Image (spheres, grey):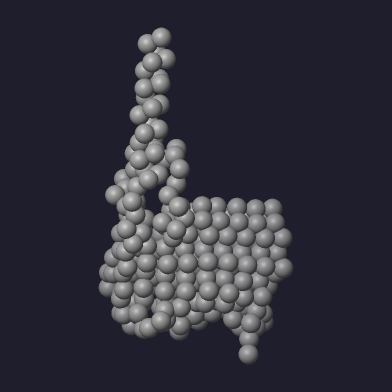
């Protein structure tokens, strides 16, 4: 009987902690910086949805929500802007309900034609891009979600990788301009590998998801 009593007590304590996390208050935050000061953007996130959209001005804007146990580290080190998700949750809080996706969404607003490169990595949510145009390279990676974009344009290499999710969108340029390296497992792709010595690298990888790419050009 004592073992049963203590087991019930421990379970009740854990559930109360989980319920407390589920009702935890989030506060909206906003970080801005002049785009001309940034040459590299690196988002390293966990369990976050990422939305990339056009900025209304010449600044880079990052919008997110923080709580006492879920927060971010945002740093600008010599033109390299890094954003990482951090947590001080206890082990038992990982077995409860997650915060609403609205509180786990990071929005990145960029001026079109920004000078620099972009790298975004996240897990268990999607990366959604309305329009992205940079003169450097672009790397988007997700584990447990999909990459969906309206228009993606880069002056350098493009790398898109999804596990347990798909890749879908339109890339600016002509098919013949790219050197394509496409890897697909447990899914379908409308593109095959097409290496070209003088082509811009386009690396696509999907595991347990489909790849559907269109090319847009004038």
Instruction: Answer with left or right where residue 101 lies relative to residue 150.
Output: left
Q: In the rendering, at what x and y percent does residue 168 appear? A: 63, 67
Q: In the rendering, at what x and y percent does residue 197 appear? A: 61, 78
Quarter that holds the N terminus: top left
Number of marks in the image? Answer: 0
Residue 13 shows in the view: yes
**Residue pictured at 42% horizontal, 67% vertical:** 107
Instruction: Answer with left or right where residue 141 lies relative to residue 196.
Output: left
**Residue pictured at 65% horizontal, 53% vertical:** 208
Q: Residue furthest bottom?
A: 218
**Quadrant in the picture for residue 162:** bottom right
Figure check: 73 above or below 191: above
**Quadrant in the picture for residue 91:** top left
Figure check: 172 above or below 129: below
**Residue pictured at 61% horizontal, 64% vertical:** 167
Quarter that holds the C terminus: bottom right
- Camera-side residue of 110 and 135: 110
**Residue pictured at 33% horizontal, 82% vertical:** 36
Residue 179 shows in the view: no
Instruction: Answer with left or right where residue 162 lies relative to residue 38.
Output: right
Q: In the rendering, at what x and y percent does residue 51 appear? A: 47, 67
Instruction: Answer with left or right where residue 37 lies relative to residue 147.
Output: left
Q: In the rendering, at what x and y percent does residue 88 appear? A: 31, 45
Figure check: 122 above or below 92: below
């Amino acid at each position: 009987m004592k073992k049963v009593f203590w087991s019930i007590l421990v379970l009740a304590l854990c559930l109360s902690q989980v319920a407390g996390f589920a009702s935890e208050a989030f506060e909206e935050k906003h970080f801005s910086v002049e785009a001309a000061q940034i040459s590299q953007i690196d988002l390293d996130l966990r369990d976050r949805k990422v939305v990339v959209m056009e900025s209304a001005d010449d600044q880079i804007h990052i919008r997110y929500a923080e709580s006492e146990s879920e927060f971010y580290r945002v740093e600008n080190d010599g033109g390299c802007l890094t954003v990482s998700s951090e947590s001080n949750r206890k082990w038992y809080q990982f077995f409860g309900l997650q915060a609403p996706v609205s509180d786990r969404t990071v929005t990145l607003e960029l001026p079109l034609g920004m000078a620099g490169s972009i790298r975004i990595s996240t897990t268990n949510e999607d990366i959604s891009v309305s329009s992205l145009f940079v003169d450097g390279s672009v790397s988007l990676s997700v584990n447990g979600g999909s990459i969906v974009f309206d228009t993606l344009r880069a002056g350098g290499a493009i790398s898109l990788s999804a596990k347990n999710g798909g890749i879908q969108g339109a890339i600016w340029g002509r098919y013949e301009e790219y050197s394509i390296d496409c890897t697909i497992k447990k899914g379908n792709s409308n593109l095959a590998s097409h290496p070209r010595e003088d082509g811009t690298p386009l690396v696509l990888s999907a595991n347990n998801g489909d790849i559907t790419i269109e090319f847009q050009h004038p």
